[in-house]
């Protein structure tokens, strides 16, 4: 058996663009002697409809006075090269005690612009990438070739010597150095290497308009909204829902925003276009993590072996001790089932967990987190479940559906170019435009001639909303996004 497709959840009624000035009531019927019995108060059939709260839980908001937010993140302390080969691609046989290697192009090393960080006198570990052998050696010579791949020569510590095939490649990392008594110091020095990132804020707007006549029209329905608005004036509901909707967009724009690719339709919009719509975009959380974070794809991790793969990746990144996994409903159930299966009674009983399931207590079939190498806390993310947003998207590989997001807890240290010094920042934080003269974090103002406004002679009230902001995802290499 399964839950039936019909009747299904409804996405309507919802907000509409309606010309309220023409909506005069015409169905008064005082000739009917029977008065209908009505419930005046709206029934909140969908509960709390707002979906924002994610950034309030894991981030912070900070002012900025620039069109671009820039920051620097630490690079690696040690260097490993994974695409090493024999010059000319020849095989080495029989064994030799001295061998030259060439460092081919790879991540972090571009022969035309970068010199290798290997220096004479350093001791290195060399492994054949096919796993057939490994050696420890000392660097006897380094040749830096301008505009071409650099080479280095080693002498091996083991007497058995070195052999390899013609197509073999190698990985090498430095583990120390060795010099004789009275020798000169290390030749050459290394400069610290940082990673520089930036993002730019976008301007978000919304508005609500109502005529002065409609503001004075009483309704028979007592309206209510999530932020406590109530009364018999319908425009109060629409104005408050516009505000709630704008609040949600302030968060979802930071999650979903993408930059405009060169040559795209958005990038082609002139900055002086008559409509005034944007033309550059911004780097949202999902975009950033898909570009330079960790991506899980092809279904949810449903077994400890799957999570061991995630943990192994985190070991290679920042190794943050505590992490929060924000999940949709299916992913949450998968984690609960995985943890329940670890108990010896998981199949035939219900005694798993750190609680006593006696007959007078409601059975708790869920888990709030687990520890395996690191602490993982599980939290349902309403945005991924809401059917009017990401909830219910087709979970097909490549379709853009997201099942969860792993966010490291705590803060990290970065160099802030505006402050000109190192600063502690949450891994996720929002930067909004603000100065002593203008604060654009959350602006709202009223124009028109109704509702207390006197800015023009138009018989209406217009409520305007504006914010200018972007999200900074620091240390994206510590995040994991779980795509469908």
Image: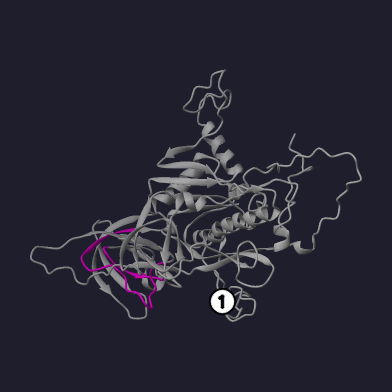
Residue 241, quarter of the rendered image: bottom right
Residue 465 image position (x, y, % from top left)? 57, 64
Residue 29 image position (x, y, % from top left)? 88, 48
Residue pictured at 56% horizontal, 35% vertical = 337
| Apparent side of residue 218 relative to residue 55 in the rendered image (left or right) | right
Residue 358, quarter of the rendered image: top right
Residue 37 vs 70, above or below: the answer is above
Q: Give the residues in magenta.
A: 97-126
Q: Residue furthest left?
A: 182
Q: Residue furthest right?
A: 31
- Residue 119 colored magenta? yes
Residue pictured at 78% horizontal, 39% vertical = 38
User: What is the secondary structure assignment of the residue under circle 1?
Assistant: loop
Residue, disc 1: 262
Tell me, yes or no, if residue 299 can be seen here.
no
| Apparent side of residue 450 relative to residue 77 in the rendered image (left or right) | right
Question: Which is nearer the eye, 407 or 419?
Answer: 419
Question: Which is nearer the eye, 221 or 254?
Answer: 221
Residue 116 vs 231, above or below: the answer is below
- Residue 257 colored magenta? no
Tell me, yes or no, if residue 466 can be seen here.
yes
Question: Which is nearer the eye, 459 or 446?
Answer: 459
């Amino acid at each position: 058996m399964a839950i039936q497709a019909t009747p299904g959840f409804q996405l309507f009624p919802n907000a509409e663009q309606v010309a309220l000035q023409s909506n005069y009531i015409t169905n008064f019927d005082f000739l009917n002697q029977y008065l209908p019995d009505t419930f005046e108060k709206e029934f909140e059939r969908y509960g709390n409809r707002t979906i924002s709260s994610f950034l309030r839980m894991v981030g912070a908001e900070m002012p900025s006075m620039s069109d671009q937010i820039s920051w620097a993140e630490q690079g690696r302390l040690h260097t490993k090269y994974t695409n090493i080969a024999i010059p000319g691609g020849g095989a080495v046989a029989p064994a030799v005690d001295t061998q030259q290697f060439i460092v081919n192009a790879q991540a972090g090393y571009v022969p035309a612009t970068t010199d290798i960080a290997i220096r004479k006198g350093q001791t290195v570990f060399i492994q054949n990438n096919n796993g057939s052998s490994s050696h420890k050696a000392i660097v006897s010579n380094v040749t830096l070739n301008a505009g071409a791949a650099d080479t280095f020569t080693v002498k091996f510590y083991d007497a058995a010597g070195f052999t390899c095939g013609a197509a073999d490649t190698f990985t090498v990392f430095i583990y120390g150095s060795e010099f004789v008594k009275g020798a000169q110091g290390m030749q050459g020095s290394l400069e610290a290497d940082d990673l520089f990132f930036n993002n730019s804020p976008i301007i978000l707007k919304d508005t609500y308009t109502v005529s002065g006549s409609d503001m004075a029209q009483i309704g028979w329905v007592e309206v209510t909204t999530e932020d406590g608005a109530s009364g018999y004036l319908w425009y109060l509901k629409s104005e408050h829902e516009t505000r709630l909707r704008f609040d949600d967009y302030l968060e979802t724009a930071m999650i979903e925003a993408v930059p405009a690719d060169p040559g795209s339709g958005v990038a082609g919009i002139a900055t002086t276009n008559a409509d005034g719509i944007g033309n550059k975009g911004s780097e949202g959380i999902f975009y950033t993590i898909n570009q330079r974070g960790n991506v899980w794809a092809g279904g949810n991790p449903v077994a400890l072996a799957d999570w061991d793969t995630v943990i192994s990746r985190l070991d290679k990144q920042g190794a943050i001790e505590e992490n929060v996994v924000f999940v949709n409903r299916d992913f949450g159930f998968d984690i609960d089932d995985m943890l329940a299966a670890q108990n010896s009674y998981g199949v035939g009983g219900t005694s798993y967990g750190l609680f006593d399931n006696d007959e007078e207590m409601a059975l708790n079939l869920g888990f709030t987190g687990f520890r395996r190498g690191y602490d993982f806390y599980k939290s349902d993310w309403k945005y991924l479940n809401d059917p009017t947003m990401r909830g219910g998207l087709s979970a097909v590989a490549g379709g853009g559906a997201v099942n969860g997001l792993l966010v490291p807890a705590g803060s990290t240290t970065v160099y802030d170019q505006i402050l000109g010094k190192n600063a502690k920042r949450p891994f996720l934080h929002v930067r909004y435009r603000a100065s002593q003269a203008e604060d654009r974090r959350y602006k709202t103002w009223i124009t028109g001639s109704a509702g207390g406004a006197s800015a023009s002679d138009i018989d209406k009230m217009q409520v305007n909303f504006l914010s200018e902001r972007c999200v900074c995802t620091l240390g994206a290499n510590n995040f994991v996004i779980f795509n469908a």
